[in-house]
Image: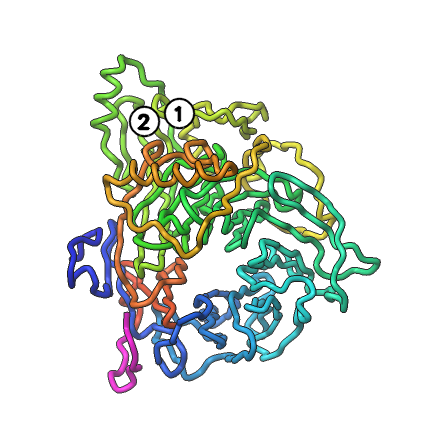
């Protein structure tokens, strides 16, 4: 059985792993479920856009409704995804497209309208265009920004607006996001805009036209590219990871800035929300994963395990679980007693309940998330109650005020002790109505977005934080256990050179020693080339590398669902 974390050096450390063990069991690579280009030849990834994967369920009555879409170089494929059930048949793609002059960079299917007969698939390109296609009908419906009059920079991320059949949001390397409606045209001239809202290092403009045309809105966020954005589970909030190193969280309807976080170094490349919308995880060029609390509007932990840039972060909704518990009691005693207790406090096993003898209660909290990076490593992380709910005595206090969703809708400071019993939000039916600014989209956002927990509203910060001297190709390498102080000195020196970079040591960007440091539950090398995809599904997790191989890892107990494949029909090629 493999150890829970990668150890050793030399040849063993460079071996490609085909299984790994966690507390819930053994995850195993399924070579027969590997997807790639039909010829199985490794893709020459030099200078190409990252391989991306997206899924959609078409609600097929046969029980095999999952569809997978992936781009490799200038090619785009759409297959039936059989997962752990059956071996992949690469000879029969539902749709295959080869593009000339531009490369697909990202894609997303509309889950609301998807059926076995039709799928609305958006594809973004390196030249800035966005294409709407139906891979099942093999039709091309529309091409947006065809003449590149809206934006000439590459598309970095695009998604359908949750709850909408017609609205989608597109991010570009220019740092702009555009809201489109599939029913509108883009016009034959460059769009004109008028200012709608302006805030701390961001602006929102609305399209100025006598007739309805795209784009409906233009967001200019930070400095540099918006590398990725993600909607909250309820669809009300938008988290943007920028090349300027800032995470910015907006209320999507009102375009109000709700919170901000700064990376430890360099740009942020990826972002994701926890299933309950209470936490955001980012990864980037500082080789770290960073956990940000939405309700507290602060960094609560960092994770160190990657040796290069972190390209994808994702929560595992199947492992994440929180149980309500009784409210904690305050610790009473001398400083010496407190230090002795705190020093002997053991970290909770992620999946088990723990009774704390001091506060007299039991609680079980698990947030599982994963990350993959350019170091070809997969890391799995567990957030537990000792990180999420530290003792009030050791808690870092902030001066930021927040709205707490108490029963009486009263306002409480964010530095007050956080009730551990309220780990998961209650249903929207019992949530109090909190006054919100009127929506600026003016009815454009389609109805039907489910209500969820109300995020905290925070004071708008007046400082403008920039980092103009960042070099994209420079990365701080793996941080050893004793190098935090040295790294702080390096970052501090860089910050001193630029008057606009003053975030280090503040709540925007705490120093390494000021917050808990997570170690990975699993850290394994699983590919030859940099990893670009990590997606958690019910029976498996899916990874992909820049060679164009999409791998399926069966969850514990699920590997037996795949029938053995005839060796004569075994596909040739690299198995990672």
Q: Is any part of residue 413 visible from this angle?
A: yes
* Residue 403 position (above or below residue 439): above
Residue that numbered label 1 is attached to:
327
Choose top left, top right, bottom left or bottom right for residue 332.
Answer: top left
* Viewer-closest of 491 and 130: 491
Q: Determine the residue positioned at 35% across, 31% down.
A: 514
Task: Give the residue at the far front of this rendering.
Answer: 497
Can you say whether 397 is above or below 267 in the image?
A: above
To which residue does mark 2 refer?
Answer: 361
Residue visible at 45% across and 39% down in the picture: 497
Q: Residue furthest top?
A: 334
Q: Nearer the viewer, residue 209 or 222?
A: 222
Element assignment for label 2: strand
Point out the stretch of residues depicted in magenta.
Answer: 563-576
Mark 1: secondary structure: loop
CA–CA distance between discs 1 and 2? 8 Å
Q: Is residue 565 rendered magenta in the image?
A: yes
In percent of width and height, residue 396 lies at 40, 27
Look at 54% across and 29% down and name the residue there.
402
Residue 128, x across and y down, in percent: 60, 66
- Which image quarter holds the C terminus? bottom left
């Amino acid at each position: 059985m493999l150890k829970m974390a990668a150890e050793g050096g030399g040849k063993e450390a460079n071996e490609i792993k085909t299984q790994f063990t966690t507390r819930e069991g053994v995850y195993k690579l399924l070579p027969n479920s590997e997807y790639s280009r039909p010829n199985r030849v490794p893709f020459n990834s030099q200078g190409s856009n990252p391989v991306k994967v997206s899924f959609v369920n078409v609600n097929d009555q046969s029980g095999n409704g999952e569809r997978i879409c992936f781009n490799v170089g200038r090619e785009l494929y759409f297959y039936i995804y059989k997962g752990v059930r059956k071996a992949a048949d690469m000879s029969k793609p539902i749709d295959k497209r080869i593009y000339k002059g531009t490369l697909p960079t990202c894609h997303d299917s509309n889950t609301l309208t998807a059926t076995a007969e039709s799928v609305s698939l958006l594809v973004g390109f390196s030249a800035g265009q966005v294409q709407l296609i139906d891979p099942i009908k093999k039709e091309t419906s529309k091409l947006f920004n065809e003449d590149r009059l809206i934006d000439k920079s590459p598309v970095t991320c695009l998604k359908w607006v949750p709850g909408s059949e017609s609205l989608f949001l597109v991010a570009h390397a220019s740092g702009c996001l555009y809201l489109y409606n599939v029913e509108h045209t883009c016009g034959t001239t460059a769009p004109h805009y008028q200012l709608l809202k302006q805030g701390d290092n961001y602006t929102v403009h609305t399209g100025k036209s006598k007739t309805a045309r795209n784009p409906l809105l233009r967001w200019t966020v930070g400095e540099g590219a918006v590398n990725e954005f993600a909607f909250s589970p309820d669809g009300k909030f938008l988290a943007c990871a920028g090349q300027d190193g800032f995470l910015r969280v907006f209320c999507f309807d009102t375009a109000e800035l709700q919170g901000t976080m700064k990376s430890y170094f360099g740009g942020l490349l990826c972002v994701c929300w926890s299933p309950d919308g209470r936490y955001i995880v980012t990864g980037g060029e500082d080789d770290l994963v960073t956990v940000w609390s939405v309700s507290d509007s602060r960094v609560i932990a960092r994770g160190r395990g990657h040796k290069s840039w972190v390209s994808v972060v994702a929560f595992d909704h199947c492992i994440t679980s929180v149980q309500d518990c009784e409210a904690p009691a305050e610790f009473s005693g001398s400083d010496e007693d407190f230090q002795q207790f705190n020093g002997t406090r053991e970290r909770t096993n992620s999946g088990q309940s723990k009774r704390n003898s001091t506060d007299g209660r039991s609680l079980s909290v698990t947030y599982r998330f994963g990350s993959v990076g350019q170091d070809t490593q997969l890391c799995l992380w567990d957030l537990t109650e000792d990180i999420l709910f530290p003792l009030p005595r050791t808690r870092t206090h902030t001066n930021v005020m927040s709205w707490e969703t108490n029963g009486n809708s009263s306002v409480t400071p964010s530095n007050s002790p956080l009730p551990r019993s309220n780990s998961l939000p209650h249903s929207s039916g019992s949530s109090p109505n909190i006054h919100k600014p009127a929506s600026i989209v003016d009815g454009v956002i389609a109805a039907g977005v489910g209500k969820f927990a109300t995020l905290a509203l925070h004071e708008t910060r007046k400082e403008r934080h920039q980092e103009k001297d960042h070099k994209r190709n420079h990365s701080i390498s793996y941080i050893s256990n004793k190098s935090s102080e040295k790294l702080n000195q390096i970052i501090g020196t860089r910050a001193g050179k630029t008057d606009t970079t003053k975030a280090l040591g503040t709540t925007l960007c705490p120093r390494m020693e000021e917050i808990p440091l997570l170690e990975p539950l699993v850290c394994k090398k699983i590919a030859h080339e940099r990893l670009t995809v990590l997606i958690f599904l019910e029976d498996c997790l899916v990874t992909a590398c820049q060679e164009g191989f999409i791998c399926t890892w069966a969850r514990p107990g699920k590997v037996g669902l795949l029938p053995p494949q005839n060796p004569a029909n075994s596909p040739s090629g690299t198995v990672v």
